[in-house]
Image (spheres, rainbow, N blue to C red):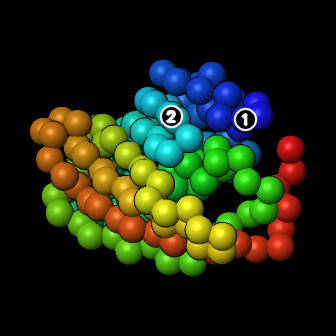
Amino acid sequence: MENKRLQLLQSFIGRPFSGSPSPFARWLNGTVVSVNEKAVEFQFTVRKEMTNPAGTVHGGVLSSMIDDCIGVNFMILGLENFYPTINLNVDFFNPAFENQTVLVKTELIKLGKTIIHFNAVVINQTNNKLVAKAGSNLAISSIKIPD
């Protein structure tokens, strides 16, 4: 069966995902690096408006990058129903500063009938250090995903 969502995302490899239906995702302005049905990679440049008073990427922005990438990874599974995030656990390890680039990698761990689990890591591409890692669960809803 043809996966139109996967094909759409693959058409953005090497470019910002301007086709996202989410205004917030478009604000994050992630570039699609790689994508398959079980994993995605997006690259983000830390902009001034994404930083905290210490000059590092704000934890909420970093968590949003992770959550958005997990959401994209979910969408390309081609499921009929929407599965909203029910938890997102993020551990922060190293900073990323303005104008640095971070790589967010997500991976499908478990595709259950009612719960889906993803893991994610964030790497600072300037120094190759682990910025954060995360785990997230999504739960089935009655909301149908439009084609």
Q: Mark 2 is on which residue type?
A: Val
Residue located at (85% from left, 61% from top):
144
Could you tell me which quadrant the C terminus lies in? Answer: top right
Can the viewer see residue 77? yes
Q: Is residue 113 above or below residue 23?
A: below
Whichever of labels 2 and 1 marks the residue nearer the N terminus, that label is: 1
Residue located at (64% from left, 48% from top):
77
Residue 72: % across, % down:
59, 48
The image's mark for residue 142 is none
User: Which residue lies under the disc numbered 1?
Assistant: 3
Q: Nearer the viewer, residue 99 or 82?
A: 82
Could you tell me which secondary element the residue under label 2 belongs to?
Answer: strand
Q: Is residue 128 above or below residue 116?
A: above
* Residues at marks 2 and 1, CA–CA distance in whole angstroms: 13 Å
Q: Quadrant of residue 124?
A: top left
Answer whether labels 2 and 1 touch (C-beta < 8 Å): no
Residue 43: % across, % down:
40, 37
Q: Quadrant of residue 54?
A: bottom left
User: Which residue lies under the disc numbered 2?
Assistant: 35
Q: Is residue 143 above or below residue 127?
A: below
Could you tell me which secondary element the residue under label 1 belongs to?
Answer: loop
